[in-house]
Image (cartoon, rainbow, N blue to C red):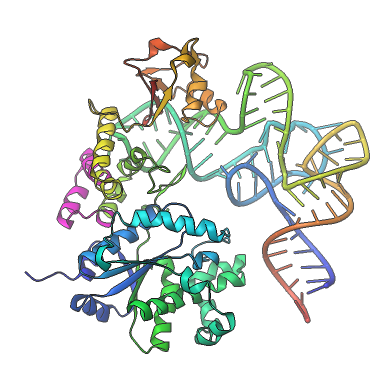
Amino acid sequence: MEKTNVFDVLKERGFIQQVTHEEELRELLGRESVTFYIGFDPTADSLHVGHLLQMIVMAHMQKAGHRPIALLGGGTTMVGDPSGRTDMRKMLTLEEIQSNAEKFKVQFEKLIDFSDGKAIMDNNADWLLKLNYVEFLREIGVHFSVNRMLTAECYKNRMEKGLTFIEFNYMLMQAYDFLELFRKYGCRLQMGGDDQWSNIIAGVDLIRRVESQSAYGMTFTLLTTSDGQKMGKTQAGAVWLDPNKTSVYDFYQYWRNIDDADVEKCLSLLTFLPMEEVRRLASLPGNEINEAKKALAYEVTKLVHGEEEAQKAQDAAEALFGKGGNLDLVPTTELEKEELKNGMNIVDLIVSTGLVPSKGEGRRLINQGGLTLNDEKVDAIDFMVTMKDFKDGNLMLKKGKKTYHRVVLR
RNA sequence: GGGGAAAUACCCAAGUGGCCAAAGGGGGCAGACUGUAAAUCUGUUGUCUCAGACUUCGGUGGUUCGAAUCCACCUUUCCCCA
């Protein structure tokens, strides 16, 4: 059977947004093993859902026999990418950046096989931090036209809000990264989110100019909801891949609750389910679409947290919303028996579990009829919780329709 | 370097001496309707020992019985000129 070109796979699944030299690149990918890179700026101590998409692309590419380089932006983060934002990035210290980079590594390894040189991880701090300013300007700077840079999409909105010189340089640094990786590993292709387009073509042009060799760029669609919002944001902030920052249960629930309109997109971009299956699931009518959401939640959770955890999350969800099942992964707070001896005010309890951030909100929640304790609506803010409310040492709180929290006695 | 404008709650944005915990919108949360969806409608949205009290309008001082509102200085941002 003829091997499918990974280019076509990416295209069919809807990843590709923009490509340089489309025909040429497709042919190259079909012909030989290509080393490519995607950069990740360690601006936070965990990757999030937006990065997941990029990791999945790397995995698709690796499966097709290409060699990924996950480039940690230890150097570029010192400067800050102005693309896609209207304000300046917070400056991070070198220590913060390096510590974040370490955490990224662990998360990459879940999706990408770094054994036997099948994939590479590098950090641009290694070459960017020791650059000599004048040399850099003479070698790299000469190839950039400011006039042209100013017309780049990524600087457009910054022209109104203000752009500092340090950020303006980001593009040169990223272009230089590509050149460096080309020289070091023969890297021919840079991929990234669509907001990286300007930076990517800068690198492609630089290699073509300096080395007179062909280099390519490709961007993916940004993960957005049907109404154009960036996906992976909740009221509590980003959805993180680190289970300590976003619990596995919450992670599962995030996907389980995705809009109908976004199900197909997510399935095709964030899972490895075959496209026939994706289409079948996405076209389920009416409330059967929930099956697709379950599949999505399970698959994505499995990719990030492993099969066992995904199963537990699913069990927990079944237990809460359906019947039976294992409650292990439901968010839980432990309470000392001592603390309940004289009863505990319900408002204090929900604040201490983190279900609500303040007592004021707790009272409001109860007054509006939004709190349920063991399937019974709590109707008084002075309700006292006592030992009697625990069944087998368990007490189940529900905020609104679907936020559950378990309290167990120790 | 010179001139001008601005900083308000999660975000945008009104408010120019007491009636301001601060309009309006967005967002969030909850209720109804549902399919753990969307849309829609309703309520709510500083903190606390919620009757009442306390802390908020870039910062620090000042004027005043009383300041988000007036004054001084500081910080930051933007615009125009060089």
Instruction: Decide if residue A202 is on the left or right side of residue A187.
Output: right
Quadrant (top left, top right, bottom left, bottom right) of the C terminus of chain A: top left
Instruction: Decide if residue A350 is on the left or right side of residue B61.
Output: left
Q: How many marks?
A: 0
Viewer-proximal residue, A153 or B38? Answer: A153
Q: Is residue A28 above or below residue A120?
A: below
- Find residue A351 and report its horizontal and vertical position in percent: 51, 27
- Find residue A40 and report its horizontal and vertical position in percent: 42, 63
Residue at figure coordinates x 43%, y 15% from the top left: A337
Viewer-proximal residue, A164 or A38? Answer: A38
Q: Quadrant of residue A38?
A: bottom left
Residue at figure coordinates x 44%, y 58% from the top left: A101
User: Does residue A228 show up?
Assistant: no
Asked if the magenta segment contains residue A289, the reply would be yes
User: Does residue A60 show up?
Assistant: yes
- Find residue A37 and report its horizontal and vertical position in percent: 35, 70
Q: Given the current orientation, which residue lies at the most extreme front position?
A: A116
Q: Given the current orientation, which residue lies at the most extreme left position?
A: A1
Q: Quadrant of residue B45?
A: top right
- Find residue A321 and report its horizontal and vertical position in percent: 28, 29
Q: Given the current orientation, which residue lies at the most extreme bottom position?
A: A212
Quadrant (top left, top right, bottom left, bottom right) of the N terminus of chain A: bottom left
Magenta segment, prevailing SS (helix, strand or loop): helix
Q: Is residue A356 above or below residue A107?
A: above
**Chain part drawn in magenta:** A268-297
Asked if the magenta segment contains residue A17, the reply would be no
